Amino acid sequence: WFSNRLINGYQVGDKLDVSEPQGEFLISRKELKTYKQFVFLSGGSGITPMLNLIANLKQHAYTGEVILIYGNKNEEEIIYKDELDQLQKEWPNFKIIYGLEESPSPVYEKCQLTVNCLKGLFEKYQIKSANSCFLASGPPIIIDNLRIFLQELKVKLTHLKFEKFFIELDLKTTQQQIGVEINKEQRQIVVAA
């Protein structure tokens, strides 16, 4: 699972060196019983770890609400849109809110995932903060905006789990360094072209 930016920068046959999966970005059995709602916030390719977490909730027949706020620049950059839309049709507990910077359609919310955007979405869709677990994955600014917003709501940050990551590519060089932050721990991965 890669971002469109990475996929479009390489050709079939190019080789990449990547690290093994790492981190502790998961939902425990205790949390399944504790929280009445899981709210996911994702930007761009940050959706990839969310898919597994959401699928795990469905597999465990979680009966609470599951809300995904998924931000992208435009409709073309929405990764796994068909799969997400199908999951929403199959599972009544699951709701997707697409936030797009460039939104020509009323089907999508026109907004970047700023603090003000989050306030508006939480109000419009009546997203509760009590008894909720918040999981965020994507560019650091999105996680920071959610953290600020939750603090304004007086939500304890122990109810927030996050995985920050970003990719800065310069395709003219033979190696790229990717910065990853998982629960406040910084890691660097070198990708060789």
Image: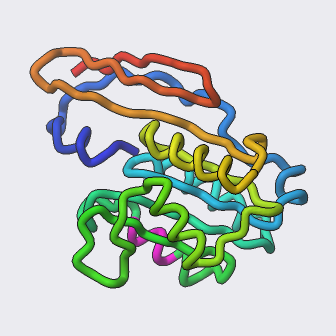
Q: Quadrant of the N terminus?
A: top left
Residue plotted at (59% across, 82% down): 90
Residue 158: quarter of image: top right
Residue range highlighted in magenta: 81-86
Residue 8: quarter of image: top left
Task: Give left or right: position of 94 versus 158.
Answer: left
Between 74 and 112, the one lying in front of the other is 112
Task: Give left or right: position of 166 versus 51.
Answer: left
Q: Magenta stretch: dominant SS?
A: helix
Residue 44 on image: x %, y % = 37, 51
Residue 26 on image: x %, y % = 70, 43
Task: Give left or right: position of 124 versus 139.
Answer: right
Residue plotted at (66% across, 39% down): 25
**Is 16 above or below relative to 36?**
above
Residue plotted at (78% across, 45% down): 156
**For the image shown, how many numbered marks are present on the structure?**
0
Note whether residue 49 is visible: no
Residue 133 on image: x %, y % = 74, 54
Q: Specify the farthest residue to the left.
A: 172
